Image (cartoon, rainbow, N blue to C red):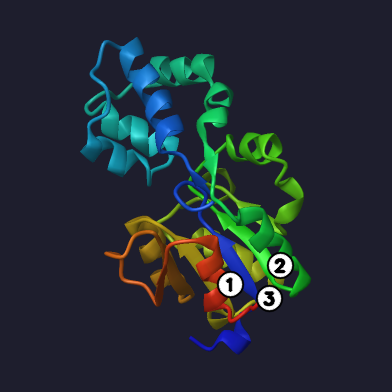
Amino acid sequence: MDISKIKAVVFDCDGVLFDTALANRKFYNEVLASFDKSKLTDEQFANVHMMTVTAAIQYLFPGIEDTKEIFACLKRIGYAKFIPFMEMEEGLVRLLKILKHKGFIRGIATNRTNTMDQVLLHNDLGSYFEMVVTASDVENPKPDPEQLDKIMTAFGLDPGEVIFIGDSEYDQKAAQSAGTWFVAFKQPELAACVNVNSMEDILGVLQINE
């Protein structure tokens, strides 16, 4: 990785910007309970963590062709009440401020859909990113590279000028397909250019001393 060429730092949301395990479990467990289904298993949670809501519902309710009732339930429940259970990663705001000061483009590429705006608003993070791309903004969400491609196109970036920080196989595959550098966050088993465990580590990757 040629650090001198990096111009943009792009983050996944769940598991990177925030620890969303509790919030997402509560959300999907309430949906499942509404249809008298058991709570998420650890395996189910690991899968829905990476997926869009649509893909997660198809996965949790296999064989159901008409999912209108399920999505109506999702709308009734809403995600807003679960946002307070999301835990912002320590050092995130400091990192984002330093990145701006150093002239880096800051982006988000997430398989969240219509909840991302609420998350940013609740945590006062809306002004900290130059571009946010959700699953709603593309035809093909991660592991497809379209989200990363969209960011690169918007800023005229080459893949070698971008690092993508993620925590799942979907993130890894998206970065590989897009040709960007992949930094694995708290997931050492993923194939990555670099593995990190904190926001402070990301400063180290970028060779920033603050």
User: Which of the image's four quarters has the C terminus?
Assistant: bottom right
Q: Residue 78 sits in which quadrant?
A: top right
Residue 103 placement (x, y as % from top left): 75, 74
| In front of the other: 144 or 184 | 184
Q: Identify the disc placed on residue 156.
A: 3
SS assignment at label 1: helix
Q: Earlier in the sequence, mark 1 or mark 3?
A: 3
Left or right: 170 as drawn, with respect to 4: left
SS assignment at label 3: loop
Q: Earlier in the sequence, mark 2 or mark 1?
A: 2
Nearer mark to the viewer, of 2 and 3:
2
| In front of the other: 116 or 4 | 4
Q: Residue 27 sits in which quadrant?
A: top left
| In front of the other: 145 or 64 | 145
Label 2, label 3: how many angstroms apart (C-alpha)?
Answer: 22 Å
Residue under label 2, please give it.
Answer: 98
Residue under label 1, please give it.
Answer: 203
- Which residue sits at x=57%, y=29%? 84
Residue 126 placement (x, y as % from top left): 73, 46
Residue type indicated by callout 1? Leu
Q: Are marks 1 and 3 in contact (CB under 8 Å)?
A: no
Residue type indicated by callout 3? Gly
Left or right: 57 as drawn, with respect to 141: left
